[in-house]
Structures are given as structure tokens and as C-alpha cells.
Amino acid sequence: QPVAAELLAHLERLALVDFRDAEGVVRLQRVIQFADRLHEVNTDGVEPMDSVLEDRCLYLREDDVTEGNCAKELLGNAREKVEEYFVAPPGNIPLPKLEEGETFLQGS
Amino acid sequence: GQPLGVLDGIPIAVKDNFNTAGIETTCASNMLKGYISPYNATVVQKLLDQGAVLLGKTNLDEFAMGSGSTDGVFGPVRNPWSYSRQYKEKSVPKPHSQDEESDWVITGGSSGGSAAAVASYTCFAALGSDTGGSTRNPAAHCGVVGLKPTYGLISRHGLIPLVNSMDVPGILTRCVDDAAVVLGSLAGHDPKDSTTIQDDFKPFELPNLTDVSKLSIGIPKEYHAPGLSSEILALWSKAADLFKNAGAKVIEVSLPHTSYSIVCYHVLCTAEVASNMARFDGLEYGHRSDMNKSTESMYAATRREGFNDVVRGRILSGNYFLLKQNYENYFIKAQKVRRLIANDFVKVFRSGVDILLTPTTLSDAAPYMEFIKEDNRTRSTQDDILTQAANMAGLPAINVPTALSERGLPIGLQFIGRSFQEKQLLTVAKWFEKQVKFPMIQLEEVKRHEHNVFQHQKSASFT
């Protein structure tokens, strides 16, 4: 069954990307339909697998500082900055609630 | 002077999703256009330490998502074989008025640029990445060796991640011996990548195998996938016979969950992508939108402007599968199916099989005009079917160019080995390579439109 409009809006909000057009929504429907095939497989008693290296111990190094002091290089790639700060527009402003059929950005 | 290392002076190319200090790294996306990496990926550093010469960064599908190298912001990659005598001889001659350039074929993807660079003799080796077949697929279409090492053998530090639990740096070369040399320079524990294993790695030289009678080659029947071209099926069969006639044990085996690996991949991949792409918000690096009403609207606008439809589609799908109501049914379910797929391989290798032999692709390279008739997601679903399971299980796999198709284009076959047994895998691959004697590409001059000017310059050089 088709994905509800509220769910689509919710996804756009979580992902902070938009579907752009109806085709994008159709693509999502197809992906879900495709993924439903997973339910044909019997996985009773099977543990989920996070990593193929699950039988090994993860490498942990000593908690010592070995590199850093490169603020200048790192700031070099940011467009908006002030001294050693990255500058963001004001936060705590929620994205506006949408009318049906709208996405966040009216044609950017 | 002293040579810096075994790769001193060797020209190499690096896929543009590896960070290269002081050099733009874009992942073929608007999101990272203008991004100058402040550091070298570990694999890049290792190559440079050996004295390798970086010729350039190669084109790819945007953020390595795709199986054609057609969806990057710099445009599609053209397979050098499109300009080979072998392909042109077999092409239906076109009427003069029609654009001669319209029947070029794709490289496959997503490491198409790297494969094309090696195939066209512009460098000796190239780095690609392999998450679902992205190194082996273009290797097959471009007639080069494409090695996907075992997950955990080579550092991913500096490789812009797609799927953290499946990504590996891939190696593209013209012959198996070269792949072993490059592997020798790259493999080994990296403290900066905690997912690299801590075992000691010793670089090796490949022996010249003459006796294959102790080998057991497995032919997984599920790899006779729907859509497999009859040509490739015949070639696969011929290869199996080659081993049989040389005395190896060749048996049919079963990997029952093979057909689910693509579905599983689509869920796990999109979920990890949704997470990995979250870092691109315009604040610290990359593209930043002019929208500045609020942090969130700036993020949303930046991501809309920076990512193409393919990337955005995957992010949205991933977020869907990670919703509370879907997490158990899709994400966890896919992780369980992943274990079943990995176990299939364990069972087969435990039964005495040393190496698996399968096709790499369903057909030879498609013409670009044909390929773009279906969307990226559909294509990936079709094209990754033979390569994806090795990523699920983390196993090493290699494409070896085998023969030319009826259209004069390369076809490759794939060998899949046991975890961390690259030496055995490459030894067998080298033996096979020697038997099949894949032909060299015969590149013709690309005809120029300014034909007259060219002629004039030519005669001028004789006076």
C-alpha cells in the first residue's frame, strides 16, 4: 500500500532531504516493495550480524593524543567562520509545517 | 639515489572518494565541489610513501552509488574499449550522417574512472572502492584485474564511507601480479581504522602455479542468475572445464541465499547511507546553501542543492527502514539474512572447496544510451547480483579478464576466496590469467572533427 503523506513529510524532516517530485515518492514505494522480499526468508533463531569481524576483538589504542593542532586547516574548508568558530544560522527554529504537496524549499 | 619503495615512479590514479591532501576530493558530487582534503587517506599515503606518482583523481558515480559510473556530477565515464579496434570491427557500420560518438559503452561502476584509467594505459594501477561490486564490475567491463580484498585487511581511513560494514578499497591493475604488488603496499593494520585486523600482514610474491590437481573449485549454481547472457554462461563453463582438464576438482555447490543478497544490500546500504550522509550539512566543509533563516533550513537547502536524486533517494529509503516501526522488520531482518548469506559461504568453504568461480557481470558493457533507459536503482539491482554477496560476507574476490564478447568487449570471471587468503586467491587467478591470455586493447586514434587542421599539422612536421 502507498506510503502515507504524513510519513513522507516525516521522512523528509528526519533526513533533511526532500523527494523533489512524485517520481521520488514512487521510487521509495518500489524500494519498500523490493525490501518486502526479505520476509520470505525464515530467520527464526538467527542472530543479526553487525560485522563480519564479530569474532575478533576491536582494536583499541591508548588514550593518548597523537595528532591535532590543525584548527587552521580544518577551518579552511568552512564557508562561514569567525575566528575559530564555525558559524551557523540561528538554531532552535523548527522547519515550517507543510501544506499537502509542498516540500521545504520552494524551488531553490 | 635510493628507490623510495617497490612502487617508486609508478603512475597511479585514485578514485575521487579517497581524501588526498591539498587536492580536491569531490566524490563526483556538488556537495564536495571545492573541498580540499586536509589529509591523505591511509592507502593514498602508503602509495605515496612507496614513491608512486599520483596522476589524478578518477570519476565515479556520485558518492559511489551506482553501477555504471554515469551518475556523477562530472558526467559519465566512457569505456576505452568503445574506441578499440576490437569493438569497432564488430559494430554495425553507421550511416555517415549519424553521430559516430553515440554508441560508446559504459565502464560499469562505480569505480569506472579508475578502471578506464588502467585500461587505457594512462596509469599502472588505480584505487577504487568496492561496496557491492564497485571495483569488480568496471574491471570486468574494462578488461582489467579488479581485486576486492577481505574486509578488514586494508584501511578505510580517508575513504569517504558509503557502508561502513562493507566498504573496502579496491585495486585495479592490468595483471594479477601487479595487484599482488599493490596489495603488498596497502594491506596491514592501521591504528586510524579500528576495523582493520591486527594480524601481521606479510607482502607476498605470487608463485607460478603449475599443478592445480590439489585445488577444489566450487561452481555455485545460484550464480546462474536470470539474465545471465548465454555468452558468459558458455565462458564460465569453459573456464570450469579448463580447471577440470588441468586436474583440479571442480564441483557444483550451493549458496542458497544468494538471491536475497541484493534485497539485503538495499536495506543495509540505504540505512548506513542515511547515517553516513548526515555529516554533510554545509557547516564545516563542502557546499553550503545561501539559505540562512535557520540551521535546519540551511541544512535542508544545502543537502537539496548538494546531492543528486540517487543519493537523496537512498537517504530517504534508509531513513524509512530505520523508523522505529520498521527497524525490527527491515533493518534487523536484513542483518539476520546477512548472517545466513555469510554462513552459506562458510559451509561451502568448510566442505573442502578452496575457491569459487563465478561470472562477474550478467553481460558485456551496455551502450550508454541503453543503460540510461532504466534508473540507477534498477540498474544497481540488476548489475550487482553476482558481486554483492562477497561484500555481505566480507570475502576477498577478484575479477580476471577472460575473453572478448561477440561485440568485441571484455568479459571477466570472478574468483571468490576464503577470508584473508588473498595469496591463494591471487595464485589461482594468476594461473587462470596465464591460461586465457586476454588480448591487449588496440586503441585507435579518436577521430577529430577538425580533420583538415590535423592533416595540415601532420604535413607541417615533415618539412
Image (tube, rainbow, N blue to C red):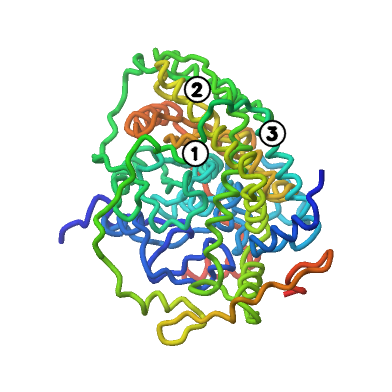
Residue A58 percent across, percent down from the top left:
34, 45
Chain assignment, label 2: B
Tell me if residue B145 can be seen: no
Local SS, label 2: helix
Which residue in the protein does label 1 denote? B391
Local SS, label 3: helix
Q: Alpha-carbon distance for marks 3 and 2?
A: 33 Å
Q: Amino acid at mark 3?
A: Arg
Using the image, tell me which numbered label, if any, was put on residue B361: none
Which residue in the protein does label 3 denote? A37
- Outermost residue, right side: A100
The answer to whether residue B192 is left or right of residue B345 is left
Local SS, label 1: helix
Which residue in the protein does label 2 denote? B239
Instruction: Give me the residue at 82% from left, 43% from top.
Output: A1
Establish if B237 lies above or below B137.
above
